[in-house]
Amino acid sequence: MKYIDPHIHMVSRTTDDYARMAQADCIALTEPAFWAGFDRSSPQGFFDYFRQLTETEPRRAAAYGIRHYCWLCINPKEAEDVGFAREVIALIPEFLQRDNVLGIGEIGLNKNSRNELVILEEQIALAAEHGQMILVHTPHLEDKRKGTKLIMDAIQANGAIEPGRVLIDHVEEHTVEMVLDRGFWAGMTLYPDSKCTPQRAVDIIETYGSERLWINSAGDWGPSDPLAVPKAQVEMLRRGHSRADVSRISLDNPLQFLRQSPRFDVDV
Amino acid sequence: MPRRADSCPLPYRQAVDLYFMEHRAKLLDVAAFLDRLGRTVERPAQDDFRVAALREAIALLGDGKGEYARRILDLFSDPGTEPIATAGEKGASGAYPGPTA
Ligand SMILES: [Zn+2]
């Protein structure tokens, strides 16, 4: 069944993964800027990374008939050094003009520190100033619930960001309801160890409905699965959900959210 | 937001047939993990905060009140509302160590 993986880090994946995703009927993906598993030694490292996201990966994806889009930012794990982070933020506006850039992301918090919050607020302001959509990373494990609240408060405090143009990712059973209640979109990440399994993601869909909700693999350099979205599709089908419901969560919803950017012109 | 009842199309018996073996195995993994900790050397007098949280979560599963996944995640969460002064380590431990740890 056709699907979109709206959050996956293809810079960390092999070309074989592109091939397998194409075989599983992935038609498009979006790749947020994130932490590479190590801290970059200079802002120029991000300049090259943004080139990789806007030049190299779209070409790799196109070789398998997959449309590639991206989101740009400095991620919260490298935001503790505020001076460094501001130098990276200064690089972003010139890249916002590029064809496959959908907005600012994945911004958010990691350890919920004051400096992370300062850089988050400045990137929310950057999105507001340039009329960009936002993709949000919420913290891991014990830091998630508190961080999710702090992030939503910061976005709403800005005042110029419409919640329907923001997707708050990596929600779980204890955060999904507050995200949807405040009018944001919510993303569920299907990871083998942390975050959601395909079974739990389908449980959440059954509990809260599928409005303003999507699923993604967030495949990266750690334990993760680039075929997690088709696995969740199978999980829905084996429980007896209709193909229309499966398509809604894995294709129609990402299309509805992402088409708010005029750049996203994926033909289904 | 209203939570939905009867939203899983599987009949009860079929759901048990489909998932029981998988979750039986996962439960035995938890049991064997706790047994393994009992055989380790240099055991502290008190449980590590993560193991203590795990034991509390297991007890919660028997209270009949439902919403187990959400309540266990809440149990593992930092209860605070304010940002911390500085980010030390990048990683998270999976349970809340308390304000002084
Ligand atoms: Zn990510």
Image: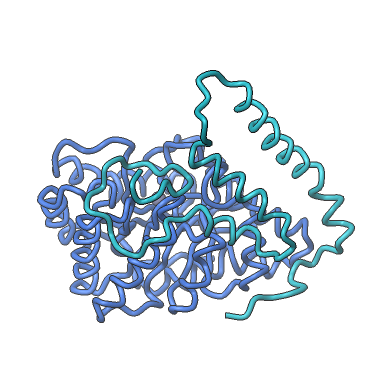
Colour option used: by chain
A69 in relation to A176, above or below: above
- Give residue B63's quadrant in the image: bottom right
The residue closer to the viewer here, A26 or A201, is A201
Q: Looking at this rendering, what residue extends furthest in the top direction?
A: B41
Say whether residue A170 is visible: yes
Q: Looking at this rendering, what residue extends furthest in the right direction?
A: B13
Q: Could you tell me residue B20's position as x and y percent? A: 81, 47
A70 in relation to A158, above or below: above
Q: Could you tell me residue A105's position as x and y percent? A: 32, 59
Can you tell which chain is drawn blue?
A
Q: Quadrant of the N terminus of chain A?
A: bottom right
- Residue drawn 22% across and 49% down? B86
Q: Could you tell me residue A122's position as x and y percent? A: 18, 65
Say whether residue A21 is visible: no
- Residue drawn 54% across and 65% down? A268
- Residue drawn 14% across and 52% down? A82
The residue closer to the viewer here, A88 or B17, is B17
- Residue drawn 49% across and 61% down? A171
Apparent side of residue A179 relative to residue B20 in the rendered image (left or right)? left
The residue closer to the viewer here, A95 or A163, is A163
Can you tell which chain is drawn cyan?
B
A101 in relation to B43, above or below: below
Q: Could you tell me residue B48's position as x and y percent? A: 49, 36
A4 in relation to A133, above or below: above
Q: Looking at this rendering, what residue extends furthest in the front direction?
A: B45
The residue closer to the viewer here, A75 or A16, is A75
- Give residue A265's quadrant in the image: bottom left
